[in-house]
Amino acid sequence: MPSDTTIEPTATITYKTNPVPIEFDLYSPTVRSDTPGALIIYYHPGATYLGSRKLGFPAWLRDGCNKRGWTICSVDYRLLPESSISDIMEDLKDMWTYVHSHLNIELKKRSLNPVDLDAVFVSGGSAGGYITFQAGHLLTPRPAGLIAMYGDCFVGDWYAKAHPPDAIIANARLGDVEKHAIEIEKYFQEGRQPVTGRPFKDGTDPHSMFYHYLIRKGEFLKRTFGVESMEEAALRSDLHYLFPQFSVKDSYPPIVLAHGTSDTAVPYEQSIFFSKHLTSKGFYNELYLLEGKDHFWDLGEEDDVLEVKAKIWAFLDRLASS
């Protein structure tokens, strides 16, 4: 399981203040240069209910950026249930606006390397992978490219049906969350203030169990998107912008999708579906399935993991230089 990073950022910057201040950690190259370099904007995992910009921040992405003279930042966003999926989409767009309107000004003030605004990539894992999918159709100008690791587009009935108590998801037994039901439900009461970071700890405290609780009850779609099923979502045109498969139309950035075939938290069929969906519309994508790997496969250093990481860097290098 991922933990909070111990890598110290070059700077922590506030990208919006309303309704609450929301920050991102910026990691600038260690070698100073006035030549603009590419930027990767990374969105953290946590099912949109927990985590922060510190959780699971991929050292391998940071090290690769540093080697290339690129900048990378890890972004906080409002979390459910205090906020909504729509709020997160607002944060996604507001961060994009900040990057294109203010970031280079801030970097110059701090004597840090500028970024090339024509080479800005979006990446993320799990919930951050979903946000990455969304970036492809919500952001203008379009990102130069996307990296979605074990991302989700919520197809099928996996998120709408109750799961048995003995089911294991992300190393946790679903039945173990039931004793915390009363405390978890308190978080879903209206009137709570927005939260932009919630520690994962070891996964045994109640607020680390939102995802498991909703999956156990078969209420993830209902509590997160306000629909009982994806069939209902397909009929709700007012909600289509929250689902990438309903929103991709005339254009979409190049994207890498990478998923473990033994993922217990987000079925790998999600990435297969979205890759096929993009291919059917003529949009470039690369899909990598890691045999036998679970969620957070990128924490490993096995040969197949290193091979996929190398392919991701080849993808980024090609787009950054084009």
Image (spheres, grey):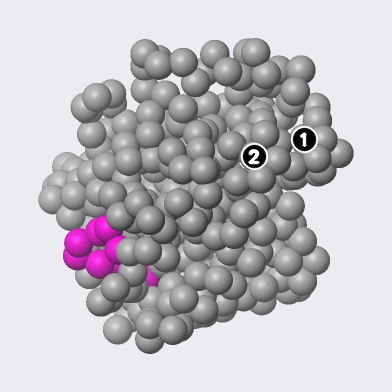
Q: Is residue 165 above or below residue 238?
A: above
Dot 2 amino acid type: Gly
Rendering coords of residue 289 (x, y %): 67, 73
Give the Cα distance between marks 1 and 2.
11 Å
Q: Secondary structure at mark 2?
A: loop
Tell me if 171 is positioned left or right of 3 in this view. right
Q: Principal SS element in the magenta part?
A: loop
Q: Residue furthest right?
A: 166
Tell me if 25 is positioned left or right of 21 in this view. right
Tell me if 132 is positioned left or right of 262 in this view. left
Looking at marks 1 and 2 on the same chain, the residue that comes earlier in the sequence is marked by 1
Rendering coords of residue 106 (x, y %): 19, 43
Residue at x 80% of width, y 27% of height = 176
Q: Quadrant where the N terminus lies? A: top right
Residue at x 71% of width, y 36% of height = 216
| Residue for badge 2 | 218
Depth order, front residue of 16/61: 16
Q: Residues within 10 Å of mark 1 (few under 14, many from 20)?
A: many
The disc at residue 194 is none
| Residue for badge 1 | 174
Q: Residue 204 sits in which quadrant?
A: top right
Which stretch appears magenta?
137-145
Residue at x 35% of width, y 52% of height = 236
